[in-house]
Amino acid sequence: MRKSILICVLSLFPVLPIARAQESWITIQPGLDLLRAHFEDRGQKFSFALVKCDPRKNEVRIIDVFHELGRSRSFSAYSLRAVKDKTEADIVTNAGSTASYSLPAPTGLLQIKGKTVSPLNRQVQNAGILCINQGRVSIVPVPQTDRLPKCTDAVQRGPYLTRESVSDLDASQHFRRTAVGVDRDGNLLILVTDEGISLAALGSFLYSSKLNLKVSAALNLDGAASSGLIATILQRTRGQRDITVGSTDGLIASSIAITKKHP
């Protein structure tokens, strides 16, 4: 259901992008909304999808793609589309990166239902962890000690994005991006771009956008050929259909899946 249409002008720092976004929010189910819009980075327009999820009303989990889809060696079996077909989730998107082009091998921490599938990688600088635990979602930097946050599901990626670090982020390399954030109300935000943008543009949009996302912490996830999102929506006139962003057929090691909680 379309909530509103308006034009927001986003005024960012001079060295960072100037962005405009047109809002068109769609309610998928209670506590789960999707925005398809665009913003401008130095005169070039980029489109994106933004998901806002209340984890108290929806189940959010991390998918270990290799074990969820079986040990088939078919390349297509490890795609986002295959995860969507297998889990029948309302929204799926890519999460951590893979170290192999033949099998989905996680490059850092991957924890599923309290079990560590892949260990923490401390060699990665400025890494962070997306942690899901009992209906709560948090994003934290990789701790200096061996004590990890208590998570049911968790995935490691980076860089960990803070409001203070935005001005230091790389503005030269442009890739399709997938990023997650947590707002001050505890909602999970997922941002996926259709085109390539810089980390500087990504961080600035999350923290400085006139959309007022109220982001308290954010994390860059796997991007480029692996970056994608599939969302199933139900419309009165068109019935059920999928909205896709980015790549849905690339190799992924892990995925975020969101489904409605059942009583």
Image (cartoon, grey):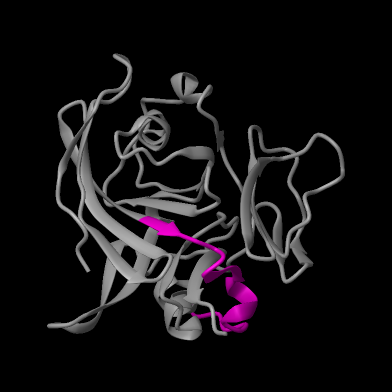
Q: Which residue lies furthest to the right in this view?
A: 146
Query: Vertical placement of 223 versus 77: above or below?
Result: above
**In this picture, residue 121 sits left or right of residue 34:** right
> Across the whole image, how many numbered discs are drawn on residues?
0
Q: Where is residue 174 in the image (x, y as percent from the top left)?
A: 34, 36
Q: Describe residue 235's horizontal placement relative to residue 185 as left or right.
A: left
Which part of the image, by quadrant, shows the C terminus? bottom right
Q: Which residue is depicted at the point 43% across and 83% down?
A: 85
Side of 217 where 9 appears, left or right: left
Residue 229, picture quadrant = bottom left
Q: In which quarter of the image is residue 102?
A: bottom right
Q: Where is residue 144 in the image (x, y as percent from the top left)?
A: 81, 34
Q: In the rendered structure, does residue 211 fall within the stretch colored magenta?
A: no
Nearer to the camera, 38 or 74: 38
Q: In which quarter of the image is the N terminus?
A: bottom left
Where in the figure is residue 20, as x and y percent of width and height? 19, 35
Depth order, front residue of 259/145? 259
Residue displayed at 50% across by 54% down: 188
Is 57 included in the stretch rendered in magenta?
A: yes
Above or below: residue 212 compared with residue 84 = above
Q: Which of 135 and 95 is in front in this view?
A: 135
- Choose between 18 and 249: the one closer to the eye: 18
Q: Residue at 45% across / 19% down in the picture?
A: 167
Q: What stretch is highlighted in magenta?
A: 51-74
Q: In which quarter of the image is residue 88?
A: bottom left
| Residue at image point 56% right, 82% down | 69
Picture coordinates of residue 216 (x, y %)? Answer: 54, 38
